[in-house]
Each structure stands twice: as structure tokens, then as C-alpha cells.
Image: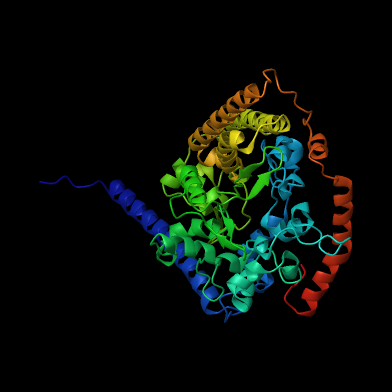
């Protein structure tokens, strides 16, 4: 015979059951409230969109106030970590070796660490790499292709003017047109707000290897909208058509094989006369090689974490370093305290940076010693093996350091790449010494002092005072005209 519950035990079970039911009711109510609010936004938009591309980000503010408010924080530049942050810092001042490595290319003029997405257009106008068209006879250095990732006006212009025509135009031609900073229509279909990369190069690269971007899962899309810009690319042909070199794979070796197969060169370094491959920022490729990418963690999971506000859960569109909000990024998976997690990141970055500095020393010496060999009678045929090694070394160095966050995304892969870069640089120096020995020189090559940005730029013949003066004139006279033109055409709403 079953034992009968005591009266107090029955009441305990009853009250416990009621508490459980009440908690479940609150949870269901919260979920339904969130779903109802989301459905209300999409079904009753105060600013309905009839076009997939709407360049003016302000038009999304009423329907998506939380996302818009957090997106506007990309203008903030206060965050700083051990390795940069959201401020623009002079990368050539930090690493003067890059002036020598990029001699013959516009990056030797000026190269700053990136600020938030809100500043992409103004930083593009101000950088000396684009030239100062219309000032003292100076024209465009770069083509229209350079605007590709700088804002939602770009997909609009591609549709209006044609993709190839957009790329082939002069850089200054799109100055009065690209006005709205990176925002909503860069990543979303304005009508449905579905995630959708808006740049054609990603679709084209995937199609060439038999894949369809449109069939990617939602979680994959949370990285692919980033991958349309944070990736390695080059300008193909006279029309400077933006192309992702992914046909043979996305590793540093596969991309090198691709470039070699089409005999592509970004520029020739005049010191060593070496045809150089300039990596852009293969962030997506290196992220996929790291543990987070391999485990299916998306870019947005770490750089755009969720925020719960009342009954609403939404994505933070501030888009910044995960170290700024460790409680909402790293600690959603890892149980260590914030300081420990931060130091884990810095440890990986420090170790990769240690090898990077050694590679830069060796590569600079390789370029300068090659110049010395040419100056002492070395022939093109003798120097070809040296140049081949310099090209291989610099491509690997650039691939590793140009990628945003590489030393944390995939520290093992970056260490491997930099290790090979150092090996190739040292092989180049040894091969160069043998060439010099054949010409009767067996001593140490006297190297110039290029230990600072100013010394390095002076050595390669850059008149920085003149260039900075032209930039100021350009910003003071040409850019205001561009902005006024955009306002008259009502293609730009000033914040």
C-alpha cells in the first residue's frame, strides 16, 4: 500500500508546481513579446523600403532604433588595447620597415590603423595613398575600385552605372557620390533586412569554384557579409576589376600559386627591382583557419554580440574589438575571468609580433643588399633567384600582418606563415651574398639608417612636406565641393 503524503508535503509540492508554472509562463511571455515586437517592426515599418539598396542609413533609424543607435557608435574612437584599438595610429611610425618594403607603392606614403566603419569615407579621402586630384597638377593614384567597400552608395552606383564602369572610373569620379558611411544596405536587403552581401566579387569568386553564396546558412551569412570586404583581392586588367584570388584555395600558398599562374604583380620595388605581391587584408581567410572559424563561430558572434534590453534581444552594431565587451563576447563560451581572457589574447599577439619584427628586419636588409648588388655590377639574370625569394618572403609577411586580428584569429597559422617568411628572407640574403662574392665583394654590406619613418621616407625620395601640403589643399577645397554636390542631389544626409 502506497504511503500517503503528509499534508505539509502536499502543499509543498503544490506551491513548487505553481512556481514552476509561473516561471515558465514568464519565459513564454518574454519569448512571445520578443517575437511580437520583431513581427510588429517588420509588418508595420514606419519607413517601408521598396528598394533592396537604400544608401542613407538615417532612413532605418525609426524602425530599428536600437540597432541604429549602436551602429552610430562606430564613430567612437575611445577604445584602445595593447595592439591598437579604434583610433587611427600611424602604422609607418610604428613599423618604419614598411616604408622600405613598400617603396614604389603608395602605401609608403601613408598607412594608418583603421578606425570604426563610420570614418571609412573621411579616412579614404584624407589618406595620401589616393593622391590629391585637382591640386597642383596631381591626379588620381588609385582607380574607382578603391571605393568598393566604403559605403552603401557603392552597390547603388554599381547598379546605376554598371559594375565594370564603376571599377574602371577614376577615383575622384566617385568622390561626390560615395558619401554615406558603411551601414545598413552594405549587409542587409533594405526591404526584408535579410543578411545579404552587396558586393559582386564575393559571389563571383564562389561561383568560379562551384559554390553559391545565396545558399549559405544564416550563421554563415553572419560572416560572409564581412567577408565581402575583409578579404584578399586584386585589381584585374586595365579595367581594375575587383577579383578575389580564391580559385586555387584561400591559403597563402594557394593564392601565391594563383598569382604566379597569371604572372600578376602589384608593384615593383625599385630598390631590389623585385615584382611584389601586396596583400590587402585577408581577414576572412585567416579567421577560417583558426579554432573559432573551424568551430562555426561567426564574425558577428564576437564583433557584434547580442544585447538584451527589456523584452528585446538585438545585435550590437557597434562592430568593434571583442575585448571591449568581454562579458558579452568571450565569456558567453569561456568561463575564465575577463583579465585572464584578455591576457590570453595579448600573449598570442605578442608572440606573433615578435616574429613579425624579425621578418621585417631581414626583409629590409634583403631589399637594401639587393640594391647594393645591382649598384656593384650584378646582372638581372644573377639577381632573379634573389628576387624570387624576396617576393615569396614579402608576400607571406604581408599576408600575415595585413589581416585584421590575424594573430588572434589563427595564431598557429600566422606563426607558420611568418616563420616561412623569415626563412625565405634569409635565403634571399645568402643568395645575394653569393652574387656579391662573384663580383669581388665579401664584406658586410653597409646599410643606410632607415630606423624611423622620416629617415626611411627621405631615403626612398619622398617629399612628405609637399605631399602633406597638397593633401591639406585637397581637403580644404575639393572635398567641400563634393559634399555640397551630394547634398544638392539629395544622395547624402549629413548627421
Q: Is residue 120 left or right of residue 294?
A: right
What x and y, as percent, mark residue 141? Answer: 74, 58
Q: Quadrant of the C terminus?
A: bottom right
Q: Is residue 336 left or right of residue 212?
A: right
Q: Residue at x 56, y 52 (%)?
A: 264
Residue 476 occupies quadrant: bottom right
Residue at the bottom extreme of this rendering? 50
Q: Residue at x 63, y 77 (%)?
A: 161
Is residue 290 depicted above or below 427 in this figure?
Answer: below
Residue 74 occupies quadrant: bottom right
Viewer-nearest residue: 82 or 105: 105
Is residue 353 depicted above or below 152 in this figure?
Answer: above
Viewer-nearest residue: 183 or 259: 259
Residue at the top extreme of this rendering? 443
What is the tally of numbered marks visible in this picture?
Answer: 0
What x and y, as percent, mark residue 146? Answer: 67, 60
What x and y, as percent, mark residue 325? Answer: 60, 45
Q: Residue at x 53, y 60 (%)?
A: 225
**Can residue 179 be seen by looking at this rendering?**
no
What x and y, as percent, mark residue 157? Answer: 64, 74
**Can residue 414 be seen by looking at this rendering?**
yes
Amino acid at each position: 500500500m502506497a504511503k500517503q503524503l503528509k499534508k505539509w508535503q502536499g502543499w509543498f509540492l503544490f506551491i513548487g508546481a505553481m512556481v514552476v508554472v509561473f516561471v515558465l509562463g514568464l519565459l513564454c511571455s518574454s519569448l512571445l513579446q520578443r517575437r511580437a515586437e520583431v513581427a510588429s517592426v517588420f509588418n508595420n515599418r514606419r519607413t517601408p523600403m521598396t528598394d533592396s539598396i537604400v544608401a542613407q542609413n538615417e532612413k532605418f533609424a525609426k524602425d530599428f532604433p536600437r540597432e541604429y543607435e549602436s551602429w552610430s557608435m562606430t564613430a567612437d574612437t575611445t577604445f584602445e588595447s595593447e595592439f591598437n584599438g579604434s583610433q587611427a595610429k600611424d602604422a609607418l611610425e610604428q613599423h618604419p620597415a614598411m616604408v622600405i618594403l613598400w617603396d614604389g607603392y603608395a602605401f609608403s606614403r601613408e598607412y594608418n590603423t583603421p578606425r570604426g566603419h563610420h570614418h571609412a569615407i573621411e579616412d579614404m579621402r584624407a589618406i595620401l595613398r589616393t593622391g590629391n586630384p585637382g591640386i597642383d597638377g596631381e591626379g588620381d593614384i588609385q582607380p574607382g575600385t578603391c571605393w568598393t567597400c566604403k559605403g552603401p552608395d557603392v552597390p547603388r552606383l554599381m547598379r546605376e552605372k554598371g559594375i565594370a564602369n564603376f571599377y574602371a572610373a577614376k577615383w575622384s569620379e566617385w568622390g561626390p557620390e560615395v558619401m554615406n558611411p558603411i551601414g545598413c544596405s552594405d549587409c542587409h536587403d533594405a526591404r526584408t533586412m535579410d543578411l545579404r552581401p552587396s558586393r559582386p566579387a564575393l559571389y563571383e569568386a564562389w561561383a568560379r569554384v562551384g559554390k553559391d553564396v545565396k545558399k549559405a546558412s544564416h550563421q554563415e551569412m553572419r560572416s560572409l557579409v564581412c567577408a565581402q570586404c575583409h578579404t584578399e583581392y586584386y585589381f584585374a586588367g586595365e579595367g581594375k576589376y575587383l577579383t578575389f584570388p580564391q580559385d586555387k584555395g584561400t591559403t597563402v600558398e594557394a593564392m601565391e600559386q594563383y598569382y604566379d599562374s597569371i604572372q600578376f604583380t602589384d608593384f615593383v620595388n625599385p630598390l631590389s627591382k623585385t615584382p611584389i605581391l601586396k596583400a590587402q587584408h585577408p581577414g576572412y581567410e585567416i579567421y577560417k583557419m583558426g579554432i573559432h572559424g573551424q568551430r562555426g563561430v561567426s564574425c558577428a558572434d564576437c564583433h557584434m554580440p547580442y544585447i538584451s534590453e527589456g523584452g528585446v534581444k538585438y545585435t550590437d552594431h557597434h562592430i568593434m574589438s571583442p575585448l571591449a565587451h568581454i562579458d558579452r563576447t568571450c565569456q558567453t563560451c569561456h568561463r575564465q575571468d575577463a583579465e585572464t581572457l584578455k591576457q590570453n589574447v595579448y600573449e598570442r599577439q605578442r608572440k606573433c609580433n615578435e616574429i613579425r619584427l624579425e621578418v621585417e628586419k631581414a626583409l629590409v636588409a634583403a631589399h637594401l643588399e639587393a640594391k647594393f648588388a645591382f649598384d656593384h655590377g650584378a646582372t638581372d639574370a644573377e639577381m632573379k633567384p634573389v628576387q624570387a625569394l624576396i617576393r615569396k618572403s614579402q608576400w607571406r609577411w604581408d599576408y600575415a600582418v595585413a589581416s585584421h586580428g590575424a594573430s588572434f584569429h589563427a595564431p598557429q597559422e600566422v606563426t607558420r606563415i611568418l616563420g616561412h617568411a623569415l626563412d625565405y628572407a634569409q635565403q634571399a640574403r645568402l643568395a645575394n651574398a653569393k652574387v656579391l662574392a662573384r663580383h669581388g665583394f665579401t664584406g658586410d654590406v653597409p646599410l643606410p639608417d632607415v630606423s624611423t619613418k622620416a629617415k626611411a621616407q627621405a631615403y626612398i625620395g619622398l617629399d612628405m612636406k609637399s605631399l602633406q601640403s597638397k593633401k591639406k589643399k585637397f581637403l580644404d577645397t575639393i572635398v567641400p565641393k563634393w559634399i555640397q554636390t551630394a547634398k544638392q542631389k539629395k544622395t547624402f544626409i549629413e548627421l
